[in-house]
Amino acid sequence: MDRAISRDHMTYKSMVIITFLALTGLFGCFMVFPPSAKAEPRWLLMARHGDCVEIESLKRKIPDLGDINDPFSFIRFMNEKGHRADSNELPAGKGRAVEVSVPELQLFLLFVTSEMCQQTGAE
């Protein structure tokens, strides 16, 4: 009877160790590569009077704009098209703002995160 208890105890102990190792491995992955708690910011264009509009509104001037959703991908897109694009990150109390100019196309844009639009009451 002691052998049966000992064998069952060993099986239980082995299962506990295997479970522990499996969970530690899973949790170890999350500790090394924690899931991103921060969502990517939503970028918009700020118009002259503080209103915010979707970036795709640029398709009127740039029909082949594609899927551009932030100032940095817009700059890359312009550079790939052979246009010089200058940028300047502006100080913002809440959110982010990036000024982008493409002088050759006479584009002078202000990309802002949605928090900036909420400050002005727009959006």
Image: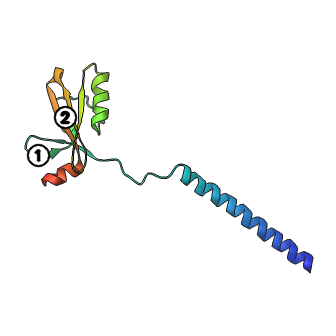
Mark 1 secondary-structure assignment: loop
Residue carrying label 2: 58
Q: What residue appears at the point 29 percent right and 23 percent down from the top-left corner?
A: 79
User: What colour-coding does the image apply?
Assistant: rainbow
Numbered disc in front, either 1 or 2: 1
Identify the mark nearer the N-term, 1 or 2.
1
Percent of width and height locating residue 10: 83, 69
Question: Eyeballing the image, is 115 above or below 106?
Answer: below
Percent of width and height locating residue 16: 72, 67
- For the residue pair 108 and 67, the one nearer the viewer reads as 108
Q: What residue appears at the point 21 percent right and 32 percent down from the top-left corner?
A: 100
Proximity of marks 1 and 2: CB atoms separated by less than 8 Å: no
Q: Farthest residue in the left direction? A: 49
Q: What residue appears at the point 26 percent right and 31 percent down from the top-left corner?
A: 65
Q: Sort mark 2 into few (<14), some (14-19) or many (20+) by Cα contacts within 10 Å.
A: some
Percent of width and height locating residue 81: 28, 21
Q: Quadrant of the N terminus?
A: bottom right
Question: Eyeballing the image, is 87 above or below 42?
Answer: above
Q: Farthest residue in the bottom direction? A: 1
Mark 2 secondary-structure assignment: helix
Q: Relative to residue 28, is residue 98 drawn left or right? A: left
Q: Relative to residue 38, is residue 66 drawn left or right? A: left
Q: Quadrant of residue 54?
A: top left
Residue carrying label 1: 50
Residue type, mark 2 in image: Leu
Percent of width and height locating residue 118: 18, 54
Q: Relative to residue 41, is residue 108 drawn left or right? A: left
Residue type, mark 1 in image: Gly
